[in-house]
Image (spheres, rainbow, N blue to C red):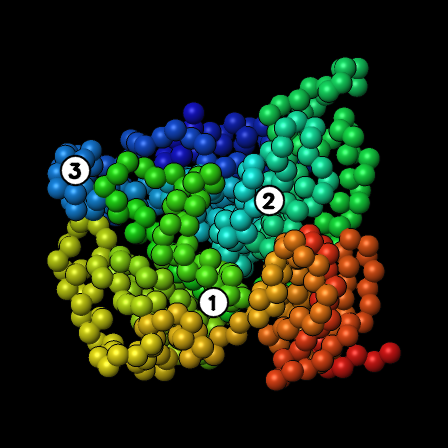
Amino acid sequence: MLNPFSKRAITRYLKRFEAAFRTYQGPRPRAMYHDSYEYICNWSPELFADFEKNRGYRLQEELPALFGRADRDRVARVKYDYRRTISDMILHNFTESWVEWCHRHEFATRDQAHGSPANLLDLYGTCDIPETEFFREQRDPLFAKLASSAAHVMGRRLTASETGTWLNEHFQTTLGQMKELVDAFFLGGVNHIIYHGTCYSPREAPWPGWVFYASTQMNPRNSIWYDAPALNAYITRCQAVLQAGQPDNDVLLYWGIHDVWQKPELLEQKLIIDQFGQWMGGSATGRLARWLWQTGFAFDYVSDRQVLGSRPDGGAIVTPGSLRYRVVVVPECRLMPIETLRGLIKLARGGATVIFESRLPEDVPGLARLEERRAERRSLCAALRLPDTPAKVATTRIGQGRVLVGAIEAALAAAGVRRERLVEQTGLQFVRRRHEHGRYYFLVNRGKQRIDGWVPLATGEAAAILMDPMSGHVGQAAVRLRHGHLQVYVQLEPNASVVVKTWEKPLEG
């Protein structure tokens, strides 16, 4: 099995592909694909050297703590440093090396980062096409948003999904179930549907032919294959919209992964899809992400590395992929690296708005230079000079920008961040993108009741059309302005979807 922490291992492994393509004369693949992390690995020959170089002390001297034989705080801090180190090793030694090799040979890269014991946002963001998946009953767009957030923040046009691998038992999945699955992907920011792999099967093989574990069996041996063109046409129309323009999310939600990493239990922590509700849902970031989603705030997750690569511009935050956001929101994290805290304050000094939910971070993670870093954290927090008076939101001006600390709903309102009230209609969910003259809204009724009425949009545009991605029908929408916001009349059955395209100016004809 390939060692995912080792640059030497991936370099040696890729030599086989280099030799194969040196004499290959056929059509070249568009991209190389790295499936979800399913390695069994917690060590590498380079680990001690990489650890000492990046964490500042020798892991060899803390092996008792690494294996739980010290006080809980020291164990947690050493394990944090170990987890952060292997995350860096997967990123730099493996993923970046693989991507560089692929680009040198003119291949794009598709990467499923989930499952890795690493910061998934950084891994997803390194490749050309981040790819996610759902498995069995999972349909949570907030998981898919890890891949699409990295694509948005890093300026990647596509977010892919491995689609339909396992929804039901073999040959029992319906096209209706597939459509619901695809909509959940779209709501999570995916715009490049890729069906699961399927086995080659000789024509003379008796039914069901040659098969493997992927149960939907999206192939000619399945009875749904003959009606699949209807689903494919639906996906094509949706993706034509979801690949157009640019994402239109307002909030960068900081992923406080350090609270996840600095725990005394276990060794490496694989962030696998089946345990998303534990490693994300049970965290401050997961709780706040769910609240933002349910309340109608459009957001993307952002990592420490991506925060440090962003810059302020005219009151906005511009990410490494040149996308603009209104605010950075930090959940109620206990731990934050001192470099990230410095970076957030630097963004505020340059004119950005930074919101901390409830309080500033209480401590720094890791073991090395602990008291020195704690002292710097206290100094940076004290320099903000937040008012002591009780209030829902404490605000301090810093340079050209500001830092807000307090209740998240009040802080977002104070920062002027818009909210899509359409989510108040039970079951209605959305993706919003912008085009040159207005916006696209992809709306899905995931509830059990028919929607028939006026749907408010958090935009002041003047006109709209409705686009039915199932039938392909397009027509001018009934619209009205209320309190400076556009409302569109929408009729949607349960599990149905529609695209609303808005314009800044009235339509003629």
Q: Is residue 3 above or below residue 340?
A: above
Q: In whole angstroms, how far apart are the C-alphas of marks 2 and 3?
A: 39 Å
Residue at numbered disc 1: 251
Instruction: From the viewer's perspective, tell me whether residue 225 is left or right of residue 449.
Output: right
Q: Quadrant of the C terminus?
A: bottom right
Residue at the location (23% across, 41% down)?
264
Q: Would you place residue 72 above or below residue 470 in this image?
A: above
Q: Amino acid at mark 1?
A: Val
Position of 131 relative to 145 (above/below): above
Precedes in sequence: disc 2 or disc 3? 3
- Residue located beneath label 2 in the image: 161
Mark 2 closeness class: few <14, some 14–19, many ≥20 residues within 10 Å: many
Q: CA distance from mark 1 to mark 2?
A: 23 Å
Question: Which residue does the image show at 49% across and 75% down from the upper left?
Answer: 417
User: Mark 1 or mark 2: which comes first in sequence?
Assistant: 2
Q: Could you say which is closer to the camera, residue 113 or residue 45?
A: 113
Q: Residue beneath label 3, please?
A: 65
- Identify the residue at image location x=28%, y=68%: 359
Estimate how packed mark 3 is, as few (under 14), some (14 to 19) or many (20 or more) residues with alpha carbons within 10 Å: many
* Dot 2 amino acid type: Ser
Q: Residue at x 12, y 58 (%)?
A: 371
Residue 125 visible in the current orientation: yes
Q: Secondary structure at mark 2?
A: strand
